[in-house]
Image: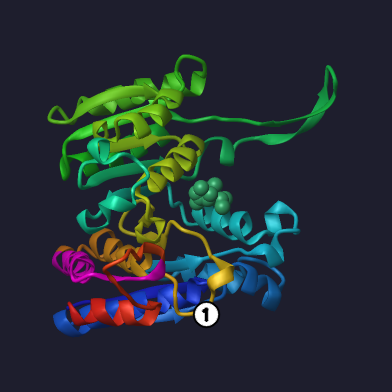
Amino acid sequence: MGVYNITVLKGDGIGPDIVSEAMNVLEAIGKKYGHTFNFNEKAVGGCAIDEFGVPLPDDTLEACKNCDSILLGAVGGPKWDHLPSHLRPEAGALLKLRSSLGLYANLRPAIIHKALSAASPIKAEIIGDSLDILVVRELTGGIYFGERGYREGKYGQEAFDVEAYSEYEVKRIAKQAFEAAMKRNKKVTSVDKANVLESSKLWRKVVTEVAKDYPEVELDHMYVDNAAMQLVRNPKHFDVIVTSNIFGDIISDEASQITGSIGMLPSASLAEGTFGMYEPIHGSAPDIAGMDIANPIATILSASMMLKFSFGLIEEAEDIENAVTAVLDKGYRTPDIYVDGTTKVGTKEMGRLICENI
Ligand code: IPM
Ligand code: MG
């Protein structure tokens, strides 16, 4: 019976719709298992720009630093797209949260639920009736946070961004991947570009070193271009993929797309220790905000990841996963995953059904 302090960042667009349902689900878990979840709501993203002039107000960042974990909805929208990148909700808020909170390990599962296997754009004979890949993306290093700038080059002004990785950074993300693999199918594919990049050569060397501590886990290395190809050609090859910040950005989008239902996919961004930030991988979908049609499942499953990774509440986390599966098996669908013969429900009703199955 624990007390957990969660900073809630609903954000923009459908953020408030979906996060409210995840909060209801946490309340239901709290009631069943005797836990207390204290929610502290703060502004982030475009709505924070409108209210305070910045996408990540100091007060929000302070709250994020002084809690047990963060539940985030989505940020951004066309209204703020014209702003310079450091002020835009996506980069301005997300990148700053990641670096200030040391959220170096980004876990992005790409899971196809049996009930939704027909939604995958990949042929049934390749995908089978389910798929379960975990992308472990390094999140606070590499080209996203490297030296950058402008300089005079041979042909006039040029811009540059440096991709640099330390052994320390590679080692800790590799460990995350191997630890995750130990709880799954014991296979890690490390994705790099070691045929060209020095940073990838170091990456490969360090990952190979770390693998020695996990003799049960099978490790293979794949160049990123090949990995992009194999993900659609033979996705069953993969169990855990570990890769750099920028490759992970791209590969995780590809992996999510092959599930065919990005409204279903959660993510966790973890710091050292138990602290983490949890959010759906999809965006803010401003065109359907407030209409009670967005799919809350990705956010609800993000709350489940929070229980598992930050609070160590494994049974409670699985309770949420099972409730989601049960509701899908009973044929309930939000419009994004609706097909003939199923029952269409809105955001709130989907949230209520999942609570009812807990
Ligand atoms: C993501 C997003 C972000 C990233 C953007 C919005 C800065 O694409 O979380 O994958 O590139 O990391
Ligand atoms: Mg991305």
Q: Residue furthest top?
A: 195
Magenta span contains residue 53: no
| Colour convention | rainbow
Quarter occupied by residue 343: bottom left
> In this picture, is 8 found above or below 173?
below
Residue found at x 58% / y 69%: 286
Residue 11: where, in percent of width, then height? 54, 71
Q: What residue span does the magenta drawing correspond to?
A: 315-335
Q: Residues within 10 Å of mark 1 (few under 14, many from 20)?
A: some
Q: Main secondary structure of the magenta part?
A: helix
Magenta span contains residue 324: yes
Left or right: 99 as drawn, with respect to 171:
right
Residue found at x 18% / y 66%: 329
Nearer to us in this view, 132 or 242: 132
- Which residue is disc 1 drawn over? 290
Residue 234: where, in percent of width, then height? 29, 30
